[in-house]
Image: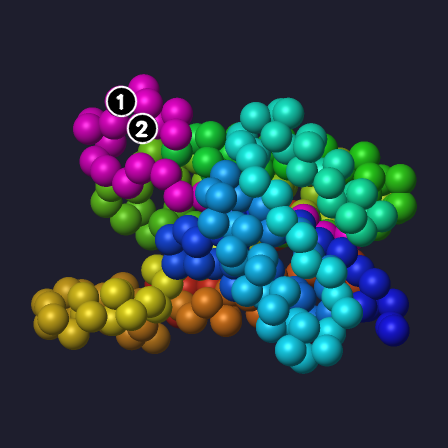
Amino acid sequence: MTAEVMRSAIVTGAGMGIGGIGRAIAARLVQAGISTLLADADPRVQDAAAEIRETLLRAGNAVKVSHFVGDLSEEAGAESMIGLAVKEFGKIDILVNAAGGGVIRPFLEHDADSLTTTLKRNLWTTLWCTQKVLPHMIERNHGRIINIGADSLRTGIPGHAGYNAAKGGVIGLATGLAKEFAQYDITVNTVSPCVVNTSRHREHLKSNPKLAQAFVQVVPKGRGVEISEVTDAVLFLAGKECAFITGQEISVNGGSAMP
């Protein structure tokens, strides 16, 4: 068994959420030989872990797959999740903060509940999970933290102001942490995808020619991002050899926004 197989990770938002990005990231890490804990407030994360574990067994892979159900936007939930990962794997090399979502609506239609929900799912979950994992990474003088951001911060998609406020906080947190913990070989980066190329998205483009034309004007590639393109970016940043890239936001957006 190689040293790479012995690595371990946590992926939040790995249940059956919108787009399935968290679950796909977890599956990709496992495929790469990384023992992975899938975490989510949604109990269906147990089903996601079981599916990945069953695939492993069929392939004869000995990598461990575990899961945690709990509210990661609360300190106690994040602390319990980290404790379980350490108990299961003995260490945590990688944290992928993929939990997100929230309420997408015009800003003036938001209320306290919708804004609080959006901030908790994105910013507070990332904040608490990161704070609780850092002591373990510092102790081992190694860690890779990857957040899932949103390209809507660059493009200003209507109805996303509240969501952008939450994801903007995630990116700001990553920038500050990257400098603060660089001395411990801990990198902190963000992968920001544009709209995911789901079957639902493709149907919308097919049934609405005007939308399709407008989409091509916004995204030169003329399509949404494939989930595999997001997971590959995460896997790259999670690598041991990716030690000199930190504090960066990588937009996986088909050219829809450029610096």
Task: Please provide percent x and percent y for residue 257.
Answer: 38, 59
**Any mark on residue 45, and which?**
none
* 44 up-or-down from 164: above or below: below
Local secondary structure at mark 1? loop
Local secondary structure at mark 2? helix
CB contact under 8 Å: marks 1 and 2: yes
In this rendering, does residue 259 appear at all?
no
Residue 37 belongs to the span the image colors magenta: no
Identify the residue under disc 2: 114
In this rendering, does residue 100 appear at all?
yes
The residue at the point 20 percent across, 70 percent down is: 203
Chain part drawn in magenta: 93-117
Judging depth in this view, the residue of 19 and 192 nearest the camera is 19
The residue at the point 64 percent across, 25 percent down is: 76
Amino acid type shown at disc 1: Asp
* 255 up-or-down from 47: above or below: below
Task: Please provide percent x and percent y for residue 149.
Answer: 49, 49
Q: How many marks?
A: 2
* 150 up-or-down from 214: above or below: above
Residue 104 belongs to the span the image colors magenta: yes
Task: Locate residue 108 relative to residue 65 in the image: left or right.
Answer: left
Mark 1 burial class by Cα count in 10 Å: few <14, some 14-19, many 20+: few
Q: Colour scheme in the image?
A: rainbow
**Any mark on residue 111, and which?**
1
The residue at the point 60 percent across, 72 percent down is: 55
